[in-house]
Each structure stands twice: as C-alpha cells, then as structure tokens.
Image (tube, rainbow, N blue to C red):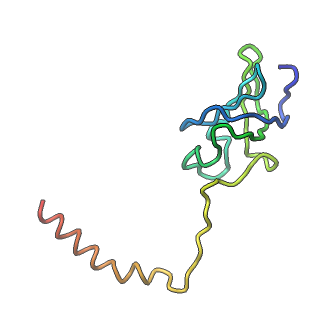
Amino acid sequence: MKNYKIGDIVKGKVTGIEDYGIFLLVDDHVTGLIHISEISDSFVRSVADYAEIGEIIKAEVIEYDEVNRRLKLSIKNESCSKRSKKHVPIKETKSGFDGLSKELDVWIKNKEAEMSKK
C-alpha cells in the first residue's frame, strides 16, 4: 500500500459493477471502488454506462485503507474521465415539438377513454 498516495492515477481492471459503483482490481493484492458519487459531476443514471467488466480504466486515488488493502477511487479527474458509452447528443430539428403537439390531443382523448373504462 505504500506504493499508493492520494492523488495518484492508477489503472485497474473492472471486476464488478453495482448500482452504487465500479469495482477495480488494481494489482494482485489491491482492490478499489469508484463510488457513484465519484464517477461524474453530472447526474449518473446508470453506473454501467461508464464501464464494462474486464475493461481497463484509469482512476485517481482519493483515499486508501492499508489494513484491508482497498483504495477509494475517483474518475471525475479530467485525465480519468470519459463520456458515457451510451451518450448520444440530441440533435435539434426544424420541426421542434410540432410532431408532439399534433398528437397531444389524440393521446389525451385515448387516455381519458381508457380511464373512464376503469
């Protein structure tokens, strides 16, 4: 554990993904967790959008536990962060919301009819 200091950038293999974070194997004896709060400064809808099992990623050491040989890691750092794999930019169209506004009355009438049957 003396090899790791706060602020160090380490590489690790993703060994697990949970709703609350990403688990890394940093070396044969040291594991790490990137908590969901340390993935992005923006809202993280799904941790799985940021890593895949088996992938090698870089992370910054923000804390370490010598007794249990665990690192608390972050990928918020510019040199560690990457975009969500499923991020697709929204393209603005000339029609804007016209398509939705044309259907809105129909959707409302259908929903009212559905609710009146219950």
Q: Residue furthest bottom?
A: 94
Q: Position of residue 17 (x, y in %)?
A: 59, 36
| Quadrant, the C terminus | bottom left
Q: Nearer the viewer, residue 74 or 14?
A: 14
Q: Residue at x 78, y 25 (%)?
A: 27
Q: Quadrant of residue 16?
A: top right
Q: Position of residue 80 (x, y in %)?
A: 78, 45
| Quadrant, the N terminus | top right
Going by the image, does 5 lie left or right of 115? right
Q: Residue furthest left?
A: 117
Say how many tags the image has: 0
Going by the image, does 41 lie left or right of 5? left
Going by the image, does 98 lie left or right of 103? right
Going by the image, does 85 lie left or right of 112? right
Q: Position of residue 91 (x, y in %)?
A: 59, 74
* Above or below 53: residue 42: below
* Above or below 70: residue 99: below
Q: Residue at x 70, y 40 (%)?
A: 55
Q: Nearer the viewer, residue 64 or 28?
A: 28
Q: Residue furthest right?
A: 3
Q: Residue furthest top?
A: 67
Q: Residue at x 61, y 59 (%)?
A: 87
Q: Quadrant of residue 12?
A: top right
* Above or below 9: residue 115: below
